[in-house]
Image: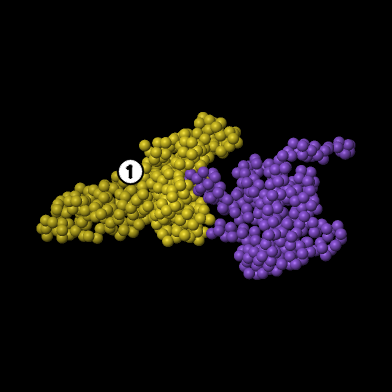
Amino acid sequence: MSAVDVQGVYKVFGHKADAAVEMLRQGRARDEVAEATNTVPAVIDASFSIERGEIFVVMGLSGSGKSTLVRCLNLMHPPTAGTVSIDGRDLMSLSAQELRRMRAEKISMVFQHFGLFPHRTVLENAGWGLEVRKVDLVERNRRAAEALELVGLKGWESSYPGELSGGMQQRVGLARALATDADVLLMDEAFSALDPLIRSEMQEQLVSLQQDLQKTIVFITHDLNEAMFLGDRIAIMKDGRIVQIGTTEDILQAPADDYVRSFVQDVDRSRVLTAGSVMEEPLAKILVREGPKAALRHMRERQTSGLLVVDKKRRLVGAALDDDVIAAIQRGEHSLDSIVSTGVATVSPETPLADCLIPSAESRLPLAVVEDGKLLGVIPRVTLLTALGRPNGNSEDGAAASSAAAEDTPATDDTTGTEV
Amino acid sequence: MPLETYRIPVGTWVDTAVDWMTDNLEWLFDAISSFLSALISTLESVLLWPPAFVLVLIVAAIAFAVKGWRFGLFTAVSFSLIAMMGLWREAMSTLSLVLVASFVAVVIGVPLGILAARNERFSSMMRPVLDLMQTMPSLVYLIPAIVFFGIGKVPGVVATVVFAMPPAVRLTELGLRQVDAEVVEAGEAFGAPPLKILTRVQVPLALPTIMAGVNQVIMLALSMVVIAGMVGAGGLGAVVFRGVTRLDVGLGFEGGLSVVIMAVFLDRVTAAFGQKASKRVSH
């Protein structure tokens, strides 16, 4: 059972909403329907389910219906048609009182302009959801204070929202949403009103909070970079419809249509893609105990001039280069120990590609992607450049070709047609 | 074709309506009348019970508490002047009329304003009614008031309530509508029932505006109560009216000055409450 399940949801504003839904179902265009029925179709046939612990981002420009969609999830805008279920319970079937209970216990919300109560202290703001639930004052204050501590606002309990900076105000908004211990968090452009610096700080804080809390988060944004940084999956909306749902890589590598493609073009791929998402199986590697002769054979087979050296547990030891290997064989050595150079450029799987460029340029060998000392994969220079240069098309051929020649080949022999 | 030949007897209709009401709604007017006169006479006797100087001190203390020593001193001096002009009894009578009329106007007007803020149709129905209540020459209210309630303080208070109520409705509606929609949404999103959102979020945030309305109500009530002096409501209005009929400039001025002194006091005190409320909200 998914945490949030949305099936065939329509939201049309206007008197003839039902007629408009009927027309839309018959496949008529949105503008045509809007004109014929004098309505505003804000959300058209939205379907998706969100798993527990997932950050699901809804991305779209203003007017795309994303804020309406998120308000359909707690029925602040009751859908004109379709179903919304939280933990398997159909919200549309609930009485007004049951729905209020659901909002108080299961779903909480964070707003673009914070929506704080200016006449209440930070602590009273954070405790609002519990107050609604009639939790007694002592317990309420304790849990509100906990939530404030979680977002880093300890010590500000008795201040008023107006005395806080924008970023801190939104932390209060976040604390208010966390204090009720709801499973589902709706965040409507929660960081859009903040300065860029504060904004990325908040994004990072949300990601690290999420690691501990494992909420189900629906995050609305108009910023694709934010969507890709936060989202486990992203739904892209246009004119009320969801045009594509997928992971960052899905959307970058295979945009569903020209609209998504045009979006993706502006994305700084070097910041969004990580080393882990483009790395390849390390073919040019050798176990440290295999010795120089085996190393030479490997190099010949792979037509490469260097190998990564790992131990039995796949931990990266270093690199062996061709001239050193040949010298070792001439000296009659049987171990690679003496010639392994430790100066291999390594990155972690989370490193954005932008930060891989310089290490890659300075190293003769492919970049080693390492986590906890273990070699996970490699990024040859061609792979790196291919990943950065190509907003569409499939990368499989390029990746295969480049891993076969896992040495510092010049990037000019790049295979498929690209627009760099 | 002269339109005058098609005489529409609006006045006759109103007369008929008033006649019907006097015949059929007497019980209602009697109830209102006895309620209001009890309220007025109780308040008046409370105000007149202590010696004038004690009340002057109390009033000055209120003034001091809300606005500081300058205003406290001014109030002490000016209210003493009222007593020393020999108009203390009349002034307290007027004050009790103003307070009762304002209280009733606020008790009726604020809920109407809340309804208007929540219901578009009710709001558009109220608007012309409020316009009528505010622009109709205030003396006109006195006529049906006398018909329904006879001569005395009650018709004065009733006419005053009608005349003074519109700002309470209008500014309550305005204040509630000005509350940030997202803040109200935040109330709803956490499952608060409508009444809780109203009392804990909307009204507190609209309070400065509502208080500005209350201030307006009191000012209008004071001006109307003086006019009501003509129908036997007594108080300073009667003094002013006597001054006018006898062409006694001195007496008229003394009555008028007392009205001004009370107006200044009531205005500053209620405005100070409004500022206090807005300070709390603008945090």
Residue drawn at point x = 74 percent, y = 36 percent: B24
> What residue is rendered at 36% in x and 47% in y?
A214
Chain B is shown in which shade? purple
Say which amino acid is labelled 1: Glu
> Quick check: B17 left or right of A249?
right
For label 1, the SS is: helix
Determine whether, in the image, residue A228 is placed left or right of residue B236: left
Which residue bears the numbered disc 1? A396
Between A378 and B59, the one lying in front of the other is B59
Instruction: Please state which of residues A148 and A260 is positioned toward the viewer in this rendering.
Output: A148
**Colouring style:** by chain
Report x, y in % for residue B217: 69, 53
Residue occupying image coordinates x 16% and y 54%: A288
Q: Chain A is drawn in which colour?
A: yellow
Q: In which quarter of the image is the N terminus of chain B?
A: top right
The location of residue B129, given as percent across then percent down, is 71, 44
Question: How many callouts does the rendering have?
Answer: 1
In the foreground, B237 or A248: B237
Crowding around mark 1 (Cα neighbors within 10 Å: few <14, some 14 to 19, many 20+) is few
Residue A394 position in % (x across, y down): 36, 43
Chain of the residue under label 1 = A
